[in-house]
Amino acid sequence: MSGEWTDGRARTALRRIFDAAVRSADPRTAVAKHLPPKPPGRCIVIGAGKASAAMAAGVDAAWPDVDLSGVVVTRYGYAVPAGRIEILEAAHPVPDESSQNAARRMLDAVRGLSADDLVLALVSGGGSALMTAPAGGMTLADKQAVNQALLASGATIGEMNVVRKHLSAVKGGRLALAARPARVVTLVISDIPGDDPAAIASGPTLPDPSTKADALAIVERYALDLPPAARAALDAGAETPKQSDIDADVRMIATPFLALEAAAQAARAEGLTPLILGDALEGEAREAGIVMAGIARSVMTHGHPASPPAVLLSGGETTVSIGKGPAGRGGRNTEFLLSLAIALGGTPNIWAISGDSDGIDGTEDAAGALIGPDTLQRARRAGVDSRARLAAHDSYTFFASIGDLVRTGPTLTNVNDIRAILIGAGTGRT
């Protein structure tokens, strides 16, 4: 495909690329390809995460002849029928009473099993908040306060999960210990940089390489103000189960990189040269926007690291550090895009999309947004100050005001963020 890259053509291509990445991580299809041998006894299905209900539906459909039951928890609005497996819903990103009930139900489901039984754990991003069993003398309110402090701290998702594991009665491998002597197989849809399965949903069925000392160091690094009961649980609690405690069988069924490969294939179909910059980009969202603007300009001006028409693809999870001041509405994807738009300053022939593959950017009702060369100009006409909105972490409001939010609804999967920057034409190499 050749010809001029108009605004409409570029936006359509970017949305197709984003949608292809999300489709590649469809839980129903992925689960059926990675199931273990059928057990001689019962199969108990447990799970937590934004994709867990769709994963459970895939298991139920694939094994109609197995003595199968179970309970999984997903985010409110993400439930789908899963036959013999009960689907619960709970809050994300801050846990609620339903999150606590889900953890209790799963612990009950795996107790009293035999060596002939199989526990199939379906794990995906978001599971940490959806399955909550506070450790020690902590209450649910204590756990909620910890989660809120972590989300506002600027800590990476990996660091957040280290703290969560050591403040939980189910995470960090503790759920697998409760299931012994049954065999435990964990199917994982990854949403984190590096695809470490022990870090996804805080690894409820996998050995935990982190220590209490690691958790305490993170608390100190970000000056987290923990409730007294949480600090006491960290100081006095036992270490999480390690490699020698758990016989782990873990299978990665969908990952951010596989999603980016699907995006690259879709980009080629649109006549674009794809360049995958990485599936594990981290750091402040606004800083990432500035860096990506520089790379996009290099493509346009020098034809490096790719020749236009091209699309720069990346995944991972950036962070938004709120600080102690007031903040508006928005998530890491819209903040990234607003920073990118400001850094590009209306540069012609560059468009971008960024969105969370689960359909929810932060806590908002949009997956992300789109930008083009006229984004800042249209915002000025609407009376919106782009720099002021970025300073206030109010990127959702910015894009809502110009009609450029991307709304997919719940996608029932989660392989983290998908970012695509389209450079439609170059200005000549120098």
Image (tube, rainbow, N blue to C red):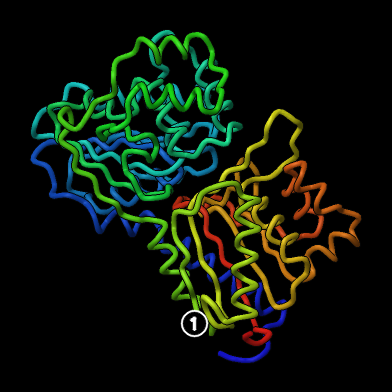
Residue at 31% across, 35% down: 46
Q: Is residue 328 rendered to the left or right of residue 20?
A: right
The residue under label 1 is which amino acid type? Answer: Ala
Relative to the observer, which residue lies in front, 140 or 289? Answer: 289
Relative to the observer, which residue lies in front, 99 or 337? Answer: 337
Whether residue 173 appears in this view of the structure is yes
Residue at 47% across, 42% down: 79
State the image quarter where residue 211 is shown. Answer: top left
Which residue carries the number 1 mark?
269
Relative to the observer, which residue lies in front, 243 or 56? Answer: 243
State the image quarter where residue 138 is shown. Answer: top left
Name above or below for residue 311 compared with residue 378: below
- The image position of residue 109, as x and y in percent, is 27, 26
Name above or below for residue 218 compared with residue 386: above
Residue at 47% across, 14% down: 230
Name above or below for residue 163 compared with residue 338: above
